Amino acid sequence: MVWKKDKDKGRDPFDWFEEWGFEDIFEEFDERFRRMQHYMNRIMKDAMEGKVPSPKEGGPIIYGWSMRIGPDGKPHFQEFGNVPTKTGIHGEMREPLVDVIESDDKISVTAEVPGVKKEDIDLEITENTLRIKVDTESRKYFKEVELPSEVDADSAKATYQNGVLDVELKKLRPTKKGKKIKIS
């Protein structure tokens, strides 16, 4: 691109751009991003095929889940990576992803525990804690969920479908509605 020369100095006002080596900077960024994307794609492909060296052998740390919808229309989860599962107080357990939703009169807990049967899930409730535990040969999950308020343990209803556990609990004391205050 040709720029109008600075009349006082007789030079292009954007000469500094070239002097500092910025003319190729965006091309260099693009090339670095292409190489990084190619490298990450290769690592993920190798990880899913079990071809990545362990971190002790100098390999990267990789851990994840892939989900595919099978011909039966159901999701199928597959773990991949080269690191052992989370180790904690309860041994080699994974911590499921959990969402807690609170309304005025109930609390809903949703947890992702794929790859198990509903008979393998052990739920224990106290007034303010929900404990989720799965201990099978192939899968181990553990999570203690702190509930935002006290619940009626006898009201608990749980369902499990396609790797998703839903637990609904009624509050012992519904959330009190506030009172509007008029400002004078």
Image: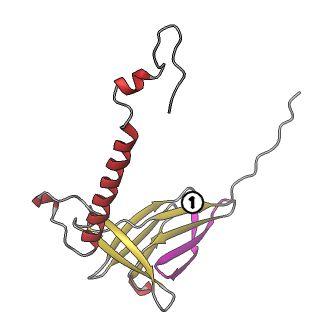
Is 64 covered by the magenta stretch? no
Residue placed furthest toward the right: 184
**Is residue 79 in view from this perspective?**
yes
State the residue in front, 60 or 13.
Answer: 13
Which quadrant does the C terminus fall into? top right
Q: Which of the pair 160/79 is nearer the observer?
A: 79
Please, is residue 95 above or below residue 29 in the view?
below
Identify whether 94 is placed above or below 175.
below
Outermost residue, bottom direction? 72
Q: In this view, does 141 lie above or below 18?
A: below
Q: Where does residue 120 sit, x and y in percent of width and height?
A: 38, 83
In percent of the image, x 54 and y 62: which residue is there? 100
Q: Give the range drawn in magenta.
A: 151-173
Q: Does the magenta stretch include residue 155?
A: yes
Toward the left, the furthest residue is 57
For the stretch drawn in magenta, what is the main secondary structure? strand
Image-quadrant location for residue 95: bottom left
Residue 161 in percent (x, y) is at 51, 82
Residue 34, image x, y percentages:
34, 54
**Quarter-wise, where is residue 132 in the image?**
bottom left
Please tell me whether mark 1 sits on a helix, a strand or a loop: loop
The residue located at (31%, 60%) in the rendering is 38
Question: Which residue appears farthest toward the top when viewing the image?
Answer: 8
Reading the image, the residue beneath label 1 is 150
Q: Which residue is drawn at 35% across and 71% down?
A: 141
Residue 86 seen = no
Q: Is residue 19 above or below residue 108?
A: above
The disc labelled 1 sits on which kind of residue?
Answer: Glu
> Neighbour class for label 1 at 10 Å: few (<14), some, many (≥20)?
some
